[in-house]
């Protein structure tokens, strides 16, 4: 490319020569220079619009702050929280006042950002029950790769784990987080890592790129529930913990920006800060998100910082949407937008090229899949928001931004236009039996597809507005569970499912609560109801059942249910199968299944521990210890927690070498990290009994019962004591 500097350096000499030419020649030469100058000016103008001085090679960084509703940020007028780092970024950027998400759920919303496609076109309609196919749908990393861009991501929540198919879209995908929470009571929201850890992982990757251009996605889970900000934000915002988590996420954004500035990347970077969806906070009866489509759930912040802080300070009132992200990045990098993408570059919109009559479409299938209620859709433009529900709603958001007054009867023409447009969007929800005949056959063989799913297309389902009281009851049950008042929680949940048998989330929570109480058979029946009323959720439910069957000694049932999850959750399901085979003492099958996971980043440490246990059972102790040492080195290097059974296996190995004290310490460590591992208590109590410390053994059994109150735990203790007496 011709650069400006050499032309400017030669200009005086050229001008001198021109002055000595005849007048006609001077006019021609001056005209040539004028044309050249205009070409160079246009060329340089284009270069300034691209990262990295026109090469399209500047970094592009997407910062996604989960569950952040726009009206809780100071840049949108909020007064109750301080976000100095987001404020500073906004000063260097374009701020879009009316940006909307297409779906109030994390996984499908991130897919829309990366593909520029609405959920129906991208094939992901819910957090559960779907897998993203990056080979079928071009993503931002795929579009940028031919331009030499590397791509990476660091995410903070289980719902965005790489196994959803997202990892395949990136060169590197960091989803390392603590998955050691007790799965009996853990929710997807419990499996996360702090934004501080995610930002540290992101900066390590970013700072290792050198001069290579890259696209990087940083996902912060704060302020998603449960709201538990670290100090000092927890104390500072004790009266409003949601805002406390916003303040914490702002601090993490500050650390990321500081790292970019220290690396010299900030000025030439394109930075997009946004949220995937908002949060209800009770404004229309929903505490969190997923069910409704009011503005608090879909109106999100959107800030675009261009290289050199171009257009900084500009605010755009026109409606924009998350499917505009891909066209924006494509335009900045100089690549073509796929024909299926209907979004528009935010840079063009900021320059005034606003699509006439633009309306943003949003949907939620969550109430249909999880609650047995109707799905919802909406259209929002600069003045009105229409919600397509069994009882439709229309709001004049210019006059009533909090959507308190339904003005549908007074605005029949607007209603008719928006309703007709909403009906042009694909809202077909494919039933699981149509998605995968093989898995449907497995479900039927186990008795889970004997009735029609409540999510059947065309069914007249209840309006979610009429189910608010059930949501409040679920919240009450969760509060009781948090207070360990399990029997009362069970009574509340049974009342909910008696009124709405299709409420799959209530059945799942009931199953987990019963499992915590040790009422395993009742828990399994509740899980079976979830499978029947919401077969789309079958893979996740089947994994929970496989674990419970394993704990209760029904190993063949555990294997059958884990097999139901093989396509949706291949690594977790195969691990569950391996564990069941090991419990059956079918060591060859356990090792076969475990070996298949040794190259799987998520499960390789769990698999190595299981294979070590197989080696211990075969009295190949040195080989087992070598495997465990490798696991310890890997987890220590990555900062991860060792997987379940690591310390148990080490204890078992050294006990067989007569290193009793080392074994006791290892069993105790296993119990500290994983208090649900009943076998660790039993083995420790046996060692204590055999070394003459029955009081210590009784204390260990008491701890086991407190952590594992189910009747089978008492039966295991009684059987252990009988065995010790027989062999005493």
Image (tube, rainbow, N blue to C red):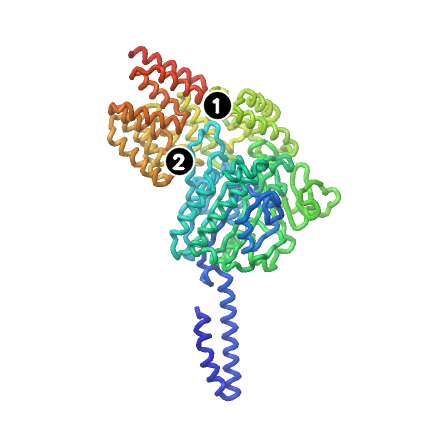
Q: Mark 1 points at which residue?
A: 516
Q: Which residue lies furthest to the right in this view?
A: 410
In this rendering, the label closer to the viewer, 1 or 2:
1
1 and 2 marks in contact (CB < 8 Å): no
Q: Quadrant of residue 316?
A: bottom right
Question: Where residue 544 sits in the image (x, y, percent)?
Answer: 46, 28
Q: Residue furthest bottom?
A: 22
* Residue lying at 38% horizontally and 55% vertically, measured from the top left: 210
Is residue 351 left or right of 592 when viewed as pictured? right
Kindly tell me whether residue 327 is visible in this rendering.
yes
Residue count near mark 1 (Cα–Cα under 10 Å), binned few <14, some 14–19, many ≥20: many
SS state under label 1: helix
Residue count near mark 2 (Cα–Cα under 10 Å), binned few <14, some 14–19, many ≥20: many
Q: How far apart are marks 1 and 2 (CA)?
A: 25 Å
Question: Where residue 423 sits in the image (x, y, percent)?
Answer: 63, 44
Question: Where residue 125 sits in the image (x, y, percent)?
Answer: 53, 40
User: Residue 83 — which label?
Assistant: none
Q: Nearer the viewer, residue 476 or 684?
A: 684
Q: Which of 192 and 414 is in front in this view?
A: 192
Question: Where residue 224 sits in the image (x, y, percent)?
Answer: 53, 38
Image quadrant in which the N terminus is located: bottom left
Q: Name the residue under label 2.
A: 571
116 in relation to 38, above or below = above
Is residue 674 left or right of 416 when viewed as pictured? left
Q: In which quarter of the image is residue 628?
A: top left
Q: In which quarter of the image is residue 642?
A: top left
Q: Earlier in the sequence, mark 1 or mark 2?
A: 1
Image quadrant in which the C terminus is located: top left
Kindly tell me whether residue 145 is visible in this rendering.
no
């Amino acid at each position: 490319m011709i650069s400006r500097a050499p032309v400017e350096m030669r200009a005086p000499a050229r001008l001198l020569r021109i002055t000595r030419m005849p007048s006609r020649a001077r006019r021609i030469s001056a005209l040539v220079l004028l044309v050249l100058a205009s070409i160079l000016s246009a060329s340089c103008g284009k270069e300034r619009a691209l990262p990295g001085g026109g090469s399209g090679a500047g970094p592009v960084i997407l910062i996604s702050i989960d569950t952040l509703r726009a009206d809780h940020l100071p840049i949108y007028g909020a007064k109750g929280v301080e976000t100095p780092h987001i404020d500073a970024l906004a000063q260097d950027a374009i701020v879009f006042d009316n940006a909307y998400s297409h779906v109030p759920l994390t996984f499908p919303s991130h897919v829309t950002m990366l593909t520029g496609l609405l959920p129906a076109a991208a094939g992901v309609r819910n957090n559960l029950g779907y897998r993203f196919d990056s080979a079928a749908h071009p993503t931002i990393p795929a579009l940028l790769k031919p331009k030499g861009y590397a791509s990476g991501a660091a995410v903070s929540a289980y719902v965005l784990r790489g196994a959803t198919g997202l990892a395949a879209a990136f060169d590197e995908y960091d989803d390392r987080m603590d998955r050691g929470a007790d799965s009996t009571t853990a929710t997807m929201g419990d499996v996360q890592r702090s934004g501080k850890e995610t930002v540290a992982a992101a900066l390590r990757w970013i700072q290792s790129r050198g001069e290579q251009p890259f696209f990087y996605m940083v996902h912060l889970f704060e302020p998603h529930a449960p709201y538990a900000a670290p100090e000092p934000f927890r104390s500072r915002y004790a009266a409003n913990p949601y805002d406390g988590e916003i303040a914490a996420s702002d601090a993490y954004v500050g650390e990321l920006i500081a790292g970019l500035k220290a690396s010299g990347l900030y000025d030439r970077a394109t930075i997009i800060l946004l949220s995937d969806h908002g949060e209800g906070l009770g404004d229309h009866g929903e505490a969190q998100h997923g069910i409704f489509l009011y503005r608090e759930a879909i109106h999100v912040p959107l800030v675009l910082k261009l290289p050199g802080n171009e257009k900084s300070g500009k605010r755009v009132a026109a409606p924009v949407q998350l499917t505009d992200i891909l066209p924006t990045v494509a335009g900045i990098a100089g690549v073509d937008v796929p024909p299926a993408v209907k979004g528009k570059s935010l840079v063009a919109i900021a320059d005034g090229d606003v699509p006439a009559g633009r309306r943003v479409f949003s949907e939620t299938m969550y109430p249909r899949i999880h609650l047995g209620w109707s799905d919802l859709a909406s259209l929002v433009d600069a003045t009105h928001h229409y919600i397509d529900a069994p009882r439709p709603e229309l709001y004049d958001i210019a006059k009533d931004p909090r959507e308190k007054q339904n003005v549908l009867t007074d605005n029949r023409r607007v209603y008719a236009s928006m309703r007709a447009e909403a009906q042009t969007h694909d809202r077909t929800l494919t039933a699981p039996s149509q998605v995968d005949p093989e898995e449907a056959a497995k479900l039927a063989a186990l008795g889970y597809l004997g009735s029609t799913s409540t999510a059947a297309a065309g069914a007249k389902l209840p309006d979610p507005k009429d189910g608010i009281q059930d949501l409040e009851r679920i919240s009450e049950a969760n509060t009781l569970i948090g207070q360990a008042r399990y029997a009362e929680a069970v009574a509340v949940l049974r009342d909910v499912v008696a009124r709405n048998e299709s409420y799959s989330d209530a059945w799942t929570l009931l199953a987990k609560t019963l499992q915590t109480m040790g009422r395993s058979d009742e828990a399994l029946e509740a899980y079976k109801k979830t499978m029947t009323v919401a077969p789309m959720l079958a893979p996740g439910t089947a994994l929970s059942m496989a674990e419970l069957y394993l704990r209760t000694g029904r190993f063949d049932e555990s294997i059958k249910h884990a097999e139901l999850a093989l396509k949706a959750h291949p690594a977790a399901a195969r691990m569950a199968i391996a564990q069941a085979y090991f419990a059956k003492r079918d060591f060859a099958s356990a090792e076969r299944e475990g070996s298949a996971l040794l190259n799987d980043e998520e499960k390789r440490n769990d698999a190595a521990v299981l294979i070590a246990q197989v080696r211990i059972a075969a009295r190949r102790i040195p080989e087992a210890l070598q495997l465990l040492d490798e696991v310890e080195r890997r987890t220590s290097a990555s900062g991860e927690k060792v997987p379940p059974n690591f310390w148990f296996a080490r204890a078992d190995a050294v006990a067989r070498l007569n290193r009793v004290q080392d074994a006791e310490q290892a069993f105790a460590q296993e119990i500290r990290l994983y208090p649900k591992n009943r076998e660790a208590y039993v083995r420790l109590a046996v060692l204590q009994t055999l070394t003459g410390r029955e009081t210590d053994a009784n204390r260990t059994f008491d701890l086991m019962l407190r952590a594992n109150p189910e009747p089978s735990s008492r039966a295991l203790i009684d059987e252990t004591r009988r065995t010790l007496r027989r062999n005493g």
